[in-house]
Amino acid sequence: MNERSENNYYHIGYWIFVIVVLTVAFGFSWGDSSAAFYFVCMLLPIVIGTSYFFNYVLVPKFFLTKRYKWFAFYTFCTAVVSVYLEMLVLLFAFVFLVNFNYQNLSPDASRIRLLAAVLYLLVFIWSLFLMMNQVIENRRIIEQLEAEKEKMKKSFLEVMSNRKIRKIPYDDIVYVESMADYIRIITVREKIVSKEKISHLDTRLPETFLRIHRSFIINTERIKERSLNEVQVDDVRLNIGKSYRKEVKELLNSNVAV
């Protein structure tokens, strides 16, 4: 749960939703949507700060590491600080929004307990959303690992060549080249021609293979040299397609780091 969603639109969309819901709720109770909007905007930084601190600091650092006492202690401290900041927001609302007239405050906005409940309800809703998102991400990773495991059960690639099924050991493959309506699989010993499409072949190969061009898939374990524009596998230099350069650079650099 300590990994933020790759799509920042989820975060932005959620907080816009929070602003709208709280503005409508307080505006209906207060009878003044504009004042309710300003009040919510002043309250929102506290809600956001509490949410992210709880979900990205307290949960991964203490709860997930089973340090429950510290988790409870820091959660309590966070709650105290949050409520104190809410009281400051109420003070500003009292000064700037209702002209020092406490009676003009919304009944809901003047109840500290209710505001604290609203704040932590939003915190836990966001936490639930993050947990669901992490579960989905974990499932995706598990599915990828299972698919990769299935690929690696066979230590060879099966293709149809000259009306015969050829079994080519992965370690023997140097690179694959697409030639319009067929492909050539270049191995350490021979070149094998097959009618299979390179896009279909790409999904069947294990993660040690990388597509660097619309026409080339290479065995990364046979890379000798590489630059921004080309890769040398064994004794052959192959161009890296412009649309593949960023992905190739990131993947190869991550492999080096590992």
Image (cartoon, rainbow, N blue to C red):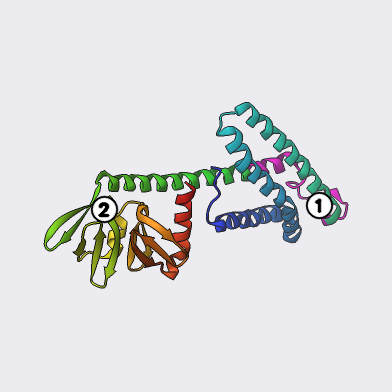
Q: Residue furthest left?
A: 163
Specify whether residue 109 is painted magenta. yes
Q: What is the three-letter code of the residue carrying label 2?
A: Asp
Find residue 93 and name its label. Answer: 1
User: What's the distance in space between the residues labelled 2 and 1, CA to CA?
Assistant: 72 Å
Q: Please, what secondary structure does the residue beneath circle 2 have?
A: helix
- Amino acid at circle 1: Ala
Left or right, residue 37 beside residue 66: right
> Quick check: 242 left or right of 83?
left
Front disc: 2 or 1: 2
Q: Is residue 161 above or below residue 63?
A: below
Residue bearing mark 2: 172
Q: Position of residue 66 (x, y in %)?
A: 56, 29
82 and 233: which is toward the camera: 233
User: Is 123 on the left or on the right of 110, as rendered?
Assistant: left
Q: In the image, is residue 230 above or below residue 159? A: below
Q: What segment is highlighted magenta in the picture?
A: 97-121
In the image: residue 114, left or right of residue 128: right
Residue at screen point 58% across, 57% down:
13
- Look at the image and tell me whether residue 102 can be seen: yes
Residue density around tag 1, few if under 14, some if 14–19, many if 20 or more, within 10 Å: many
Residue 27 drawn at (x, y percent): 71, 56
For mark 1, give the secondary structure.
helix
Choose top left, top right, bottom left or bottom right for residue 76: top right
Residue shown at 36% from the left, 52% from the top: 221
Q: Residue furthest right?
A: 100
Q: Residue furthest bottom?
A: 180
Q: In the displayed image of the protein, which residue is found farthest to the front?
A: 235
Asked if residue 116 lies in the magenta stretch, the reply is yes
